[in-house]
Amino acid sequence: MPDVGGIAGERLRSFIERIERLEVERSALGDDLREVYAEAKGTGFDPKIMRQIVRLRKMETNDRAEQEMLLDNYKMALGMIDSFDMPLSGSGQVSEPEQSGELVQS
């Protein structure tokens, strides 16, 4: 194929065909993923939660911890959780009340 308007036709065709093959492969992988999620659902697992876990596992540990902390802070601000429901994650935070009702610094 000749160059047209400064575009190398054969080179362009090569790129386009590679992209098309990859699109077919991506579609097949998507089908495979759907099958795995359906199989997991059939055995009692929740695919929506599994997707969240997969997304979290892709994240760096520090990024994941920061996101979880922000989520907990937002929940507290909206009254969705008490501060006592939150796990202790660092020094200087107040822990759950002891039997005497006093708050303990960790």
Image (tube, rainbow, N blue to C red):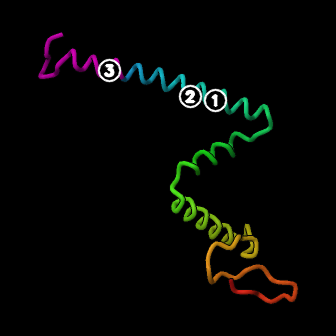
Residue 60 pos. (x, y %): 51, 56
Judge the density around disc 3: few (<14), some (14-19), many (≥20) Cα neighbours within 10 Å. Answer: few
Answer yes or no: do the residues labelled 2 and 1 have beta carbons within 8 Å?
Answer: yes
Judge the density around disc 1: few (<14), some (14-19), many (≥20) Cα neighbours within 10 Å. Answer: few
Q: Which mark is residue 34?
A: 1
Residue at (63% x, 84% y) in the render: 92
The N terminus: image quadrant:
top left
Distance Cα–Cα, label 3 vs label 2: 21 Å
Residue 96 pos. (x, y %): 77, 79
Judge the density around disc 2: few (<14), some (14-19), many (≥20) Cα neighbours within 10 Å. Answer: few
Distance Cα–Cα, label 2 vs label 1: 6 Å
- Look at the numbered disc 1 and give the secondary structure of its residue: helix
Q: Give the labeled residue for mark 3.
A: 16
> Residue 37, located in which quarter of the rendered image?
top right
Residue 19 pos. (x, y %): 37, 23
Q: Give the labeled residue for mark 2.
A: 30
Q: Which residues are magenta?
A: 1-18
Q: Which kind of residue does numbered mark 1 sit on? A: Arg
